[in-house]
Amino acid sequence: MDHGIEFPVFRLHVVPAVLSLASPSWQRDVWLRPEEFEDLDYVVTVLFDDFCDADDPAPWLGRSLRTEEEVALMKELGEVYSTVEEEVGHGAPDEVYLHARAWGSVMAVAGRLAQVMVTNDLRAAALLHRTNGT
């Protein structure tokens, strides 16, 4: 069941952050370039501090997460990310994270979550389009 989004602007930060965690080319091409604004620390801040809490995402249902499936996948993402952080140490450079043994699990869970989030957003947009009769 789609619980909607109380804070759409939050969602506008969360979805791209999840997408970047799912994209190895984005990680290499953006995160590893010092002149770029976005890096892993920015993504972690979005997903764990500012617009969600990947360690405890349930309170974000209906705020920045639409469904229980998104909550469950976000929780899983928080868990696999924490595994990598324990392996490499908090504050390690992005490149070290990207070469961690469990980083593939982070990307895999983020990929599943990204697919679910984008599908849910498209479904909601289609419903809104039908409801407005346009």
Image: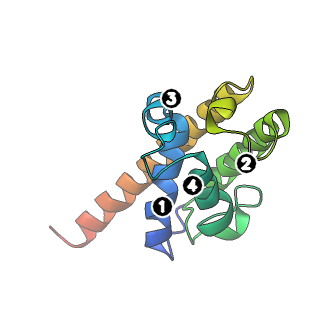
Q: Name the residue under label 4.
A: 42
Q: How far apart are marks 1 and 3 (CA)?
A: 19 Å
Q: Distance between the residues labelled 3 and 2?
A: 18 Å
Q: Mark 2 points at which residue?
A: 78
Q: Is residue 72 left or right of residue 32?
A: right
Could you tell me the amino acid type at mark 3?
Pro
- Looking at the image, do the residues carrying marks 1 and 3 touch, with CB atoms under 8 Å apart? no
Q: Distance between the residues labelled 4 and 3?
A: 16 Å
Residue that protrudes farthest toward the right in the picture: 86
Q: Quick one: 119 or 78, which is closer to the camera?
A: 78
Helix, strand, or loop for circle 3?
Answer: helix
- Residue located 49% across and 42% down the image: 20
On-image quarter of the N terminus: bottom right
Q: Is residue 68 left or right of residue 88?
A: left
- Which residue is under mark 1? 13
**Where residue 9 appears, x then y in whole percent?**
44, 71
The residue singled out by tag 3 in the image is: 24
What's the distance in space between the residues labelled 1 and 2, CA to CA? 16 Å
Q: Earlier in the sequence, mark 1 or mark 2?
A: 1
